[in-house]
Structures are given as structure tokens and as C-alpha cells.
Image (tube, rainbow, N blue to C red):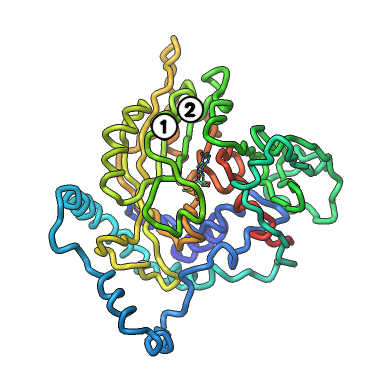
Amino acid sequence: DSETQKLSLFYESGIYYFDDSNAVFIDPVRVLNRSYNSFRVSPSVYYPRFFESSIPNPISNVTSSPTKRKRKRKRIAKEPPSLNDRELIAVQRHQEARPLLLKGHECLLKSTALLEALSTLKNDSGCWQRECQGAQDSFIELRHEAPLLEVMLNLRLDDPDQVPNDLEVSPNVRCCEQIVLPAFNNLVANDTKVEAVAEILDNRYIIPRESCFYMSDLGQLRNLIPAHADSGFNLIMVDPPWENASAYQKSRYPTLPNRYFLSLPIKQLTHTNGALVCLWVTNREKLRSFVEKELFPAWGVSFAANFYWLKVKANGSLISDLDFFHHRPYEVLVLGYSPGKVNSSGNHSSFKTLKDDNVIISIPGDYSRKPPIADLLLDYVPGLKPPRCIELFAREMMGGLVAWGNEPLHFQDSRYFVER
Ligand code: SAM
């Protein structure tokens, strides 16, 4: 039946479209794995959270102290007793998004076959041979040695142009071309149709087919501005290191004050035919209004729609109550268009303009790791196919994408992969 068909499509692509709905479920592991042939993103490493059994753990109740219980009760307050103006706007935004979010979640709960599949997404299926080893260094610390550090790129030589994307290359084929390049402030590209292995010091990183990274601080981002706008980007995804009160976040990566993002060269990175710009924001009203009133105008980007990333557990339930004021189970992706320059012949490519809000449902991975959304947006990207795509402040790479940030190899460490 159609449900079975949709499920097998989901197993192939990692994407499940619900009927008559603006909602979609994605398994980031399957989406990412389309960029690899002999390696796989390890599902058990990707999903460190939200797979706990749905039966409450009796031990945690016994050991919870009265203070802990008190704190818990405080945290689940749905709305603060008195709201200031900004909080009122935040509540209003939430109320506007609520029906769409509820409808999306309902779609998931009604898709019984998909729901059953969720609990198995973390399983490493039989074909994996071994977990890769890796010892991760923080790039943010390494950059002090930046001018000295080199990356050795091991590219497969077995005529990559002849290897179709879906063909499994024998892991024994290891004939390589080795290229040594500066690791920082330099565009490192794997132009082949299979993944490459990069080595920096003693660490190994798996580089997706047809992808590049540029590892640098914000100051060097300008080096990615193309000499001619017709080699600019059609899809620009941005996940800035917003300042945040969370001490946990502070220990994970450095953050930047908002004014730094005003000068991101979005206009200069935009392709002649224009670009779809996708910006991850938190639910803080101060930030939402900064984006609408200052950031998008500064970038010359016109607002198109909001996408909501709704986070669920493996049992299909939301990670927190939809109405928790300080801990919403969703994040927002604000989308807009950067116009580019219409050339003299007035040539505009044909693409669907994005007007409607959408819901993307997935089980979250590591802290602040966003689901790979590029494939979901392709219909709305201006310009010729395949579009030229860049991710700013990236921590991982994907086939067909340029990844820029101060740690674009973070999740490419071989310890996040299994080898066939
Ligand atoms: N989208 C990523 C993901 O899904 O894993 C998360 C990106 S995280 C919100 C922001 C990133 O910006 C972090 O990797 C952080 O190290 C990086 N960053 C912070 N300050 C930076 C700077 N001055 N230049 C470049 N990158 C910076």
C-alpha cells in the first residue's frame, strides 16, 4: 500500500512527506549518508539523546531530592505569571505557529508505520564492519597553530568520474592521490564522486563526495566572495553562534554579539540569479525582532516564510510540552530571498517562490546540531540546477555544499562514522 511505499522511500532518502500537509519527517542520518559510499554516519553516535525507553525510570523518582523536585516544578511553568511586552509578542508568535505545529505532530502520530520505524533509527544495521576510531581536537584551539597546520587529503584515484554515486566501491580499493594543503584559511575540495579521507595531525576526517570546506575565523569569510557574481551561491544557510545565557553552550563553542552578523557578506555571496537565505534563530523575541528589523534589511534579504523544526523523541512524543514558555520543543528557521543582479536580458530562472510556513520533524542529535535541510528546499532555490550551496558557521559537511566556519570538520571526525 502507499504507506509501505512511502516508508521504503523514507528508508532510501531519509525524508517522509506527509500527505496534504506542510510537514515532513526527516532522519538526518539517512540524509547525510547519501554523501558517502564506503562510510556511514553512525546512527548510534548521531543520536545520543531521546531514545530512552518511554517507561519512566523508577530509580530517578526515588533519588530526586525535594529541591530538585521544586526546581522541576518551576521549570514546567507554562507561562510566567506576568508578561512584559516582549514576552507577550513571543506568546503571540507561538500562538500563531501552534496550529501548524500541532497539525504536523498529528500527521506523525497518525503514520503508524513511520512511528514504528522511529525506534529503530538508532540501530546500526548489519552491514557495518567497525566503528571508526578518532580522537577529536578542538579546532577552535588548534587555530592558534593555524599557519602551520596542514591537511593531507587522500583522494581515490579509481577514475571517480566513472563511478556512479550509488555504486559501492570496494573498501579494498585504496589507491590514492595524496594532496597536502594548509588546513586553515584555505578552500579544501574533494571534487571526486566518492568520499575522501583527510588527516590533520593524528585525526582522520571523512570528507563527503563533491564537497569543500574553508576553516577560518569570521575575518577571512570574505575570501569566499566570488570574483564574479555568476559563480556566487543560490542557497545560503546560516546558523550563527548567537549569544545565549546557557553556560552549557558557552562551553561548546564561542559566541558572537549580534552586530558581527550585520556585516556578513550575504549580498556579495549571492549568485546573479539570487539566493534563498535560511537563518536558524532561537525563540528569544529579542533575536526574532533583531532578525526582522535589522539583520534581514542589512543583508538586503526579503522575508519569505518561517520553517519550524519540531523536535520529537523516538516514541513520537514532543521533547517538551508544546506550551512550555522557556523551553519550546521547536526552533525556527527564517527564510528569505537575496535578490542577486538581474542581468541585462532580464533572465530569471524559474522556481517556486516560498510562501508557506512548514514543519520539519526530527529526533535531535548532539547539542545544537541542526538537521540537514538543503534537500527540502531545492524547489525554492533560484538559479540553475544543481544549485550552488554554502553553509555558514557549519560544523559538518554534505555532498554538493561548501562548509565554512571555524570548525567545519567537527562532525566529520571519523569517530562519528562506521566503515563498511
Ligand atoms: N549548524 C551547526 C550544526 O548543526 O552543528 C551548529 C553551528 S553553531 C550554532 C555556531 C558555530 O559558529 C560553532 O561551530 C562556532 O564554533 C562557530 N563560530 C563561533 N565564532 C566564530 C567565528 N568568529 N568565526 C567562525 N566561526 C565561529
Residue lying farthest to the left in this orientation: 82
- Residue 119 visible in the snapshot: yes
Q: Nearer the viewer, residue 148 or 394?
A: 148
Residue drawn at the location 34% of the way across and 78% of the way down: 68
Which residue matches tag 2?
Answer: 383
Residue found at x 26% / y 33%: 293
Q: Is residue 90 above or below residue 47?
A: above
For the question of whether residue 397 can be seen, the reply is no
Q: Looking at the image, which residue is at 28% across and 69% down?
A: 75
Q: Which residue is mark 1?
A: 351
In percent of the image, x 57 and y 42: which residue is there?
406
Question: Three-letter amino acid code at disc 1?
Answer: Phe
What amino acid is found at the position of numbered circle 2 in the picture? Gly
Q: Secondary structure at mark 1?
A: loop
Foreground pick, 338 / 88: 88
User: At which x and y percent is residue 173?
Assistant: 84, 51
SS under mark 2: loop
Q: Quadrant of residue 217?
A: top right
- Find out whether the residues at labels 2 and 1 contact each other: C-beta distance under 8 Å: yes
Residue 255 pos. (x, y %): 45, 45
Asked if residue 311 lies left or right of residue 79, the reply is right
Q: Give the alpha-carbon distance from disc 2 to disc 1, as whole Å.
A: 8 Å
Q: How many residues crowd around disc 1 within 10 Å: few (fewer than 14), some, or many (20 or more)?
A: few
Counting residues from the start of the chain, the first of labels 2 and 1 encountered is: 1
